[in-house]
Amino acid sequence: MLTLRTPVLVLSGFLGSGKTTLLLRLLEEASLRGLKPGILMNELGKQDVDGNILKEHSSASLEKLLDGCICCSKKSEITGSLNLLLKKQPDMVIIELTGVANPEEIADALTEPALLGKLRLQHIVTLLDAEHSLEYNSIFASDKKLVHTLRRQIETADYVIVNKTDLVKPAQLSKLEKVIRKHNETAQIAYTTYSSLDLSPFLAGVSARTDAKQPAVKRPQAGKPVPMRQPAAQHEFQSHYHDHDPIEEVRSYSRVQTLTLPCSLTVTIHRGQLERFLSSWRDQLIRAKGYLFFKDTGQMYLMQHAGKRTNWESAAYAGEPYLVVIGINLDVQRFEQEWQRLTLSN
């Protein structure tokens, strides 16, 4: 009996580009179509942030690889995690990579003998932060492996989503498109805000299993989706894989550090204090996110910091507050000391 291979959608893109927001939109769309997806999520931090976000919004099957990058230190765990998801018979698998992962390595992992015949790579989707992507080569010049990884995120993509376009001028988008086309002539490109676009291309050909068919949910009225720009010809993804330096595969970055910091419920730190603290580390800080409790409001918040911007939203998270910090050439010891002074003095 012929076994159908489960389609895999890979979400790639640097830290803070909007991957989790896109994932949430995909899960909503999958539900509307009566599909049951499985999620493999990777985070650099020891504590999970994005997984908690998913739990608040979706009941999809979820496997997590924490405290390392899926394409290097956690690569040996991919097969086991995917097989656990496959036991739940998902209609598709969505892999959300950490922002410093090379999707080329994930495509290679899907061909491991233990997964052979079970999965097929549907698409690789790479998100770019319109506001900061052009600066990355100079910002990360000291980490050649990371620069290589960011380039491969573009080169291996079937679809490139330029997100956060509301934060830049048209001239910036024009420059960014030239960079994309320099590294990838055939990917389809979409320009979005909040990762909002027509998701049909990503789910095309995915159908519910006949042995576990779910009724489709009636689709609500929505705004007009952002279309993809069609390339001259659709490329075959496999054509990207040749002549890559095996040394670069050992690690996707060399100077990126991650740090998980506790923040007691009794601390009286204020939102403005935290934002000023993060801003003071802007030369080394790439990304910060976590759950923080403010006594003055009596509310737990999900905090997301990327680039120079910090966003807050109320959260249902009920555990101990914490902050995950990701930086390049980050003075971890000094950061911890200053965090302790900030939180212990309040």
Image (cartoon, rainbow, N blue to C red):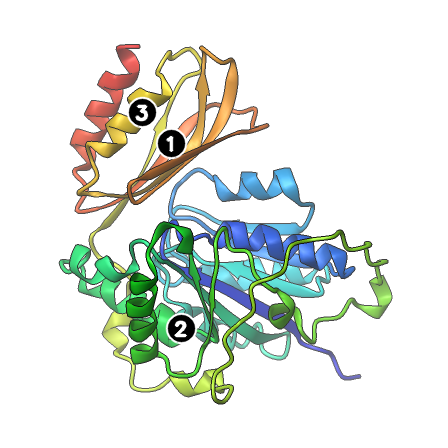
Picture quarter with the C terminus: top left
Relative depth, front residue between 270 and 317: 270
Q: Secondary structure at mark 2?
A: helix
Q: Residue furthest left?
A: 142
The image shows residue 148, relative to residue 277, as above or below, that is below
Find out whether the residues at labels 2 and 3 contact each other: C-beta distance under 8 Å: no
Q: Tally the numbered discs.
A: 3
Q: Residue furthest front?
A: 170
Quick check: 242 left or right of 337? right
Q: Position of residue 123 (x, y in %)?
A: 54, 73
Q: Which mark is residue 104?
A: 2
Q: Mark 1 is on which residue type?
A: Leu
Q: Earlier in the sequence, mark 1 or mark 2?
A: 2
Picture quarter with the N terminus: bottom right
The image shows residue 76, relative to residue 105, as above or below, that is above
Q: Secondary structure at mark 3?
A: helix
Q: Is residue 329 visible?
A: yes
Q: Secondary structure at mark 1?
A: strand
Task: Write down the residue under mark 1.
Answer: 323
> Dot 3: within a 10 Å radius of its alpha carbon, few (fewer than 14), some, or many (20 or more) residues?
some
Task: Write down the residue under mark 3.
Answer: 274
Residue located at (45% from left, 10% from top): 296
Relative depth, front residue between 193 and 15: 193
Q: Which mark is residue 221?
A: none
Q: Earlier in the sequence, mark 2 or mark 3?
A: 2
Relative depth, front residue between 302 and 86: 302
Q: Position of residue 308 (x, y in %)?
A: 28, 41
The image shows residue 202, relative to residue 288, as above or below, that is below
Quick check: 161 left or right of 147? right
Q: Mark 3 is on which residue type?
A: Leu
